[in-house]
Image: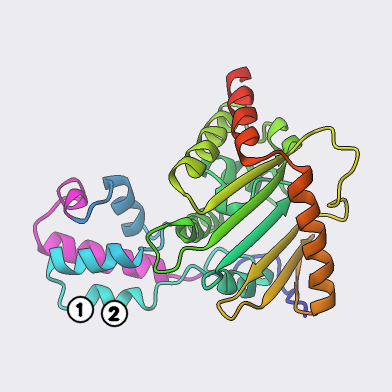
Amino acid sequence: MTNSTTNEPEPSDSLKTFGLVHKACRKRAGLTQEEFAPLVGYQPSTVASIEQGRRLPPRAYVERAEEVLDAFGVLRAAAKYATRQPGLASWFREWAELEEQAISLYTYECRLVPGLLQTDGYARAVMWNVPQRPTDEQVEQRVAARFARQELLGTSRERPTAFNFIIEQAVLERHTGSEEVTRVLIDHLLEVTERHWNVEIQLMPLRQPVHAGLDGPMHLLETPENEWLAYAEGQKTGHLISDRKAISVLQQRYAKMRSQALTPEDTASLLREMRGAL
């Protein structure tokens, strides 16, 4: 099935609303962001992002905030309406919903670093590079949505998702944004794999005469019922694939690419080498 409509994400104030409610509760308790942050085990910058509506509040954060602020269930209730959908392209939303429950998620990208691994600077550079240039408000919505999705990488979830990313080395060699943006991005990729036992990153080397992914990017997902789905994306469109035969072909291709790409260990070594050359 294909889900393709407009090319702009629909605006929503759900995250901003939660942020305002959170801010009111914090001020009622007489706490600054700097005083409140250590009480819930997060950085002041995270608290600020949540109150500005730029980040989806993690479930653990909401529960701790409820207790610390004695919020009478207000934050817990408001969190139910805070959604990670604002800022996501319309054709991607259905897949994003499936991601939240996935037990396995495999991604091959030859165009850019996947959103789940992007930094703030890289995400903004990608958005600014592609015409038509979005407004400042649209950029903030999209950045917030990408950071919210990155909560999926967490290992503290009840059932952490197993991730594998295969990324073309050329994507990083492009230095999208600037060398400094790329330097921060590479540091982030290394940190993600060091901090998350459930995340594997493999680079496809620049020279690979035999390559099973020449048909383009692909995403594969395993549901809690152990069913597999796939997703393919193009210019302003996305295609959710449920046909078993088609998915079988994509699984074969992905399995082949995992053997053709560098191992996670060799990938980390190459990333450090690339980082040192910047």
Magenta span contains residue 91: no
The image quarter in which residue 126 lies:
top right
- Which residue is pictured at 68% across the width and 35% down the height? 172
Q: Is residue 166 visible?
A: yes
Q: State the separation of the CA atoms marked 2 and 1.
A: 6 Å
Helix, strand or loop for disc 1: loop
The one of 90 and 155 positioned closer to us in this rendering:
155
Query: Who's the residue at 21% across and 50% down the image?
Result: 37
The residue pinned by badge 2 equals 77
Can residue 110 be seen in this snapshot? Answer: no
Q: Quadrant of residue 159?
A: bottom left
Q: Which mark is residue 73?
A: 1
**Badge number at residue 133:** none
Provide the secondary structure element on which disc 2 rests: helix
Judge by depth and name the residue closer to the eye, 264 or 180.
Answer: 264
250 lies above or below 241: above
- Image x and y of residue 46, in percent: 33, 50
Quick check: 210 above or below 107? above
Label 2: how many Cα within 10 Å (few below 14, some 14–19, many 20+): few
Residue 36 sits inside the magenta stretch: yes
Q: Which residues are magenta?
A: 12-39
Q: Amino acid at mark 1?
A: Gly
Indicate the quadrant containing the N terminus: top left, top right, bottom left or bottom right: bottom right
Q: Answer few, some or many: residues within 10 Å of disc 1's Cα (few below 14, many 20 plus, some between 14 and 19).
A: few
Residue 240 point in image, percent of width and height: 74, 74
Q: Looking at the picture, does residue 21 appear above or below residue 148?
A: below
Amino acid carrying mark 2 in the image: Ala
Point out residue 239 in the picture as x, y percentages from the top left corner: 77, 71
What residue is rendered at 59% in x and 74% in y?
98
Q: Which residue is at the far top?
A: 277
* Quadrant position of residue 215: bottom right
Q: Badges 2 and 1: C-beta atoms under 8 Å apart?
A: yes
